């Protein structure tokens, strides 16, 4: 089963929190697919990854660019996984029928958006019923993460 971790954003927006997580994931040598809800969101996150940290680089590309199979971090609105990534990140309350093909899924949701919180609870239940291993992380004021039990 896939390990599914829910990341409850409370203090920093997705555009700040996601690059920090991706820096750790990429630093550990994992490839990642990020599934977003729209082309506009994909463009926003693409820009955030370019601007995240001037001292480091998060190599990435989008479904609209050449050589998707060479992208360690790949942004898409679909379910393709051209580089054989083992990590899936879902934002904007999107779902994926391909979750079982990944080792780990990171579900990121905005804690200030009640619809997003409600949708995350529904997905939590769905994953639990499907016997995925679940963890819940709550964002700290400093932008880090506390694992909750």
Image (spheres, rainbow, N blue to C red):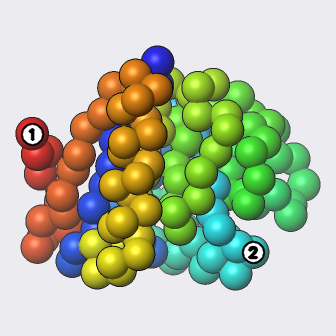
Instruction: Describe residue 128's horizontal placement relative to residue 100 as left or right.
Output: left
Q: State which quadrant residue 116 falls in.
A: bottom left
- Secondary structure beneath dot 1 equals loop
Mark nearer the N terminus (2 vs 1)? 2
74 in relation to 44, above or below: above
6 in relation to 126, above or below: below
22 in relation to 83, above or below: below
Q: Position of residue 137 (x, y in %)?
A: 21, 50
Q: Position of residue 42 (x, y in %)?
A: 67, 71
Instruction: Describe residue 28's horizontal placement relative to residue 146 as left or right.
Output: right
User: Of 3 and 70, which appears nearest the observer?
Assistant: 3
Q: Position of residue 66 (x, y in %)?
A: 90, 54
For the point 43% across and 62% down, the residue is: 119
- Secondary structure beneath dot 2 equals helix
Q: State which quadrant residue 60 falls in.
A: bottom right
Could you give the CA–CA distance between mark 2 and mark 1, rounded to whole angstroms?
A: 35 Å
For the point 68% across and 51% down, the residue is: 74
Residue 27 visible within the image: no
The tag on residue 149 is 1
Residue 127 visible within the image: yes
Instruction: Describe residue 36's horizontal placement relative to residue 147 as left or right.
Output: right
User: Of 6 and 70, which appears nearest the observer?
Assistant: 6
The tag on residue 132 is none
For the point 35% across and 72% down, the residue is: 110
For the point 11% across and 73% down, the residue is: 141
38 in relation to 80, above or below: below
Residue named by callout 2: 39
If the image is split into quadrants, where does the C terminus sit?
Answer: top left
């Amino acid at each position: 089963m896939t390990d599914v971790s829910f990341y409850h954003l409370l203090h920093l927006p997705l555009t700040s929190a996601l690059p920090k997580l991706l820096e750790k994931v990429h630093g550990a040598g994992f490839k990642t697919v990020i599934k977003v809800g729209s082309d506009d969101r994909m463009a926003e996150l693409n820009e955030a990854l370019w601007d995240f940290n001037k001292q480091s680089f998060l190599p990435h590309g989008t479904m609209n660019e050449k050589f998707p199979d060479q992208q360690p971090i790949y942004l898409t609105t679909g379910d393709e996984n051209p580089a054989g990534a083992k990590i899936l990140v879902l934002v904007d309350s999107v779902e994926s029928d391909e979750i079982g093909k990944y080792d780990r899924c990171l579900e990121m949701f905005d804690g200030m958006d009640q619809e997003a919180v409600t949708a995350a609870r529904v997905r939590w239940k769905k994953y639990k019923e499907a016997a995925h291993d679940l963890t819940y992380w709550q964002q700290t004021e400093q932008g880090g993460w506390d694992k909750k039990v």
